[in-house]
Amino acid sequence: MVIQLLITLLALIAILGVVRRFKHGAISRAGLIFWLALWIVIGALVWTPNFTNRIAAFLGVGRGADAVFYVSIVVLFYAVFKLHGKLENLEQQLNELV
């Protein structure tokens, strides 16, 4: 129960941060919608562990927490891959400018 409260609190803090960044023009409307949806889903999944267990059964994983962990790792690796590509592109553009 404590972890549910902590993750919910983290999600609420993240939602407030996303809204603040949107108000300051740091993210677009599409970014706002994406991040709000992500944090709302995270908050909802914490309080409905049976749903993650069903997802785990569909994916062939033993527990819902394991499924969330595996999917999170894959998403993080993909994000690092995309960021690395963008960084290389920026370095190339900077070299061309210099």
Image (tube, rainbow, N blue to C red):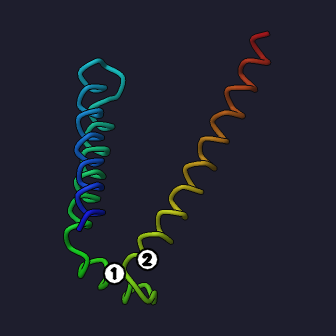
Secondary structure beneath disc 1?
helix
Q: Residues within 10 Å of mark 2 (few under 14, many from 20)?
A: many
Q: Residues within 10 Å of mark 1 (few under 14, many from 20)?
A: some
| The C terminus, quarter of image | top right
- Residue closer to the observer: 79 or 11: 11
Q: Is residue 34 left or right of residue 98?
A: left
Percent position of residue 48, x then y: 20, 73
- Residue closer to the observer: 8 or 95: 8
Residue on which the image places disc 2: 67
> At x 29% / y 85%, what residue is drawn?
54
- Numbered label attached to residue 55: 1
Secondary structure beneath disc 2?
helix
> At x 29% / y 32%, what residue is drawn?
17
Percent position of residue 20, x then y: 25, 26
Q: Label 2 is placed on what type of residue?
A: Ala
Asked if the residue under mark 2 is in contact with the one under mark 1, i.e. CB atoms within 8 Å, the reply is yes
- 78 in relation to 22, above or below: below
Percent position of residue 59, x then y: 43, 84
- 34 in relation to 48, above or below: above
Number of on-image labels: 2
- Numbered label attached to residue 86: none
Q: Residue furthest top?
A: 98
Q: Label 1 is placed on what type of residue?
A: Ile
- 45 in relation to 61, above or below: above
| The N terminus, quarter of image | bottom left
Q: First in sequence: mark 1 or mark 2?
A: 1
Percent position of residue 16, x then y: 23, 35
